[in-house]
Image (cartoon, grey):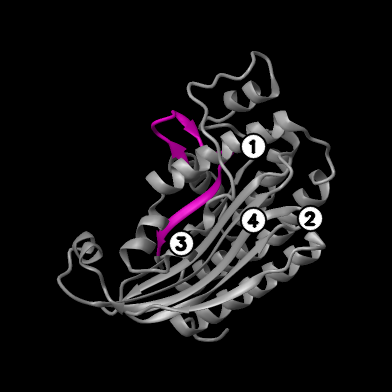
Amino acid sequence: MPHIDKEHIAGVFRNIQDHICAELEKADGLGEFQEDKWTRPGGGGGRSRVLRHGNIIEKGGVNFSEVHGKTPEKLLKSFGLTEGEFFATGVSIVLHPENPWVPIIHMNIRYFEMSTGTYWFGGGIDLTPHYVDHDDASFFHEKLKAVCDKHDSFYYKEFKDWADNYFYIKHRKETRGIGGIFFDHKSGDKEHSKEDIFNFVKDVGLCFAPIYTYFMQKNAGKPYGSREKNWQRLRRGRYVEFNLVLDRGTKFGLETDGRTESILMSLPPEAGWEYDYEPPVKSLESDTLRLLKKGIDWTA
């Protein structure tokens, strides 16, 4: 295996971006990603790729970044340091479909290191259906569990719980969706080398395309009307609330002078907020709200 340094990791992440974009374009059949290369004034840059008005994907972004430079004061304080350089690279994805029966999905894989030698990996995948479907939820979690189990039999339980707690909208007392896996600050230890963790992160990135293209093919042809579109806008509103109020990745990007357009590409093209909305009792909408909670075992 090649030496696992930051240049190698960034190169693998670039290839994963290429792979995912190609598979999504093939599955969509119409939309094409438009690439926007950018540079960061403090060092580094990235490739933002956005697809709009496709057959299935209304708006989606698959971004790659590789940034470096002087570590911002806020991060230094959080690490208990007074000075140092940082390097960060990652792939970040959010897809908002046209059809309300196709779920929103988010993925992120990332690597961070300091000039002091400190490093870690992070990432995960989570699914936000507008309407929760048990079969789809089970499919999603079983695929993630298989990826986790390949590397460590304890990963899935740990990272699923982490996702349930992280993707939780505290002011709404509901989860953003049906969760998935989430992990952060993973570095080598006596059980897992840096290479082990990198291989796991790489597999998380590579499982994205087959998982989401399955949902595209399965659900994009389902009929929908104004009721489903209105509900979709309300669920997108919850997504916006989480990303702007609670998401650490959004905050990190803005605090490190990342590119604002790329950071906020996660927001949907349209979203809605209706005052004190309560869906009809025993409706599909109320069933979905009932299932937006922590601790559900979707693989049972």
Using the image, tell me which numbered label, if any, was put on residue 74: none
**Is residue 43 positioned above or below 245 on the image?**
below
Using the image, tell me which numbered label, if any, was put on residue 263: 3
**Is residue 206 positioned above or below 296 on the image?**
below
Give the residue at x 23% y 63%: 79
Q: Which residue is mark 4?
A: 59
Mark 2, Cα crowd under 10 Å, few <14 / some 14-19 / many 20+, is some
Q: Which residue is mark 1?
A: 232
- Viewed as shown, does residue 214 lie left or right of 261? right
Helix, strand or loop status at disc 2:
loop
Q: Which residue is mark 2?
A: 55
Rendering quarter of residue 151: bottom right
Q: What whole-number distance in Å separates the C-alpha atoms at marks 1 and 4?
A: 14 Å
Mark 1, Cα crowd under 10 Å, few <14 / some 14-19 / many 20+, is many
Q: Is residue 300 visible?
A: no
Helix, strand or loop status at disc 4:
strand
**In the rendering, at what x and y percent does residue 95 appear?**
63, 54
Mark 4, Cα crowd under 10 Å, few <14 / some 14-19 / many 20+, is many
Three-letter residue code for mark 4 = Lys
Q: Reading the chain from its start, which is encountered first: label 4 or label 3?
A: 4
Q: Residue furthest top?
A: 281
**In the rendering, at what x and y percent does residue 144 appear?**
64, 51
Q: Reading the chain from its start, which is encountered first: label 3 or label 1?
A: 1
- Viewed as shown, does residue 216 lie left or right of 106? right
Q: What whole-number distance in Å separates the C-alpha atoms at marks 4 and 3?
A: 14 Å
Looking at the rendering, the stretch of residues picked out in magenta corresponds to: 167-186
Q: What whole-number distance in Å separates the C-alpha atoms at marks 2 and 3?
A: 24 Å
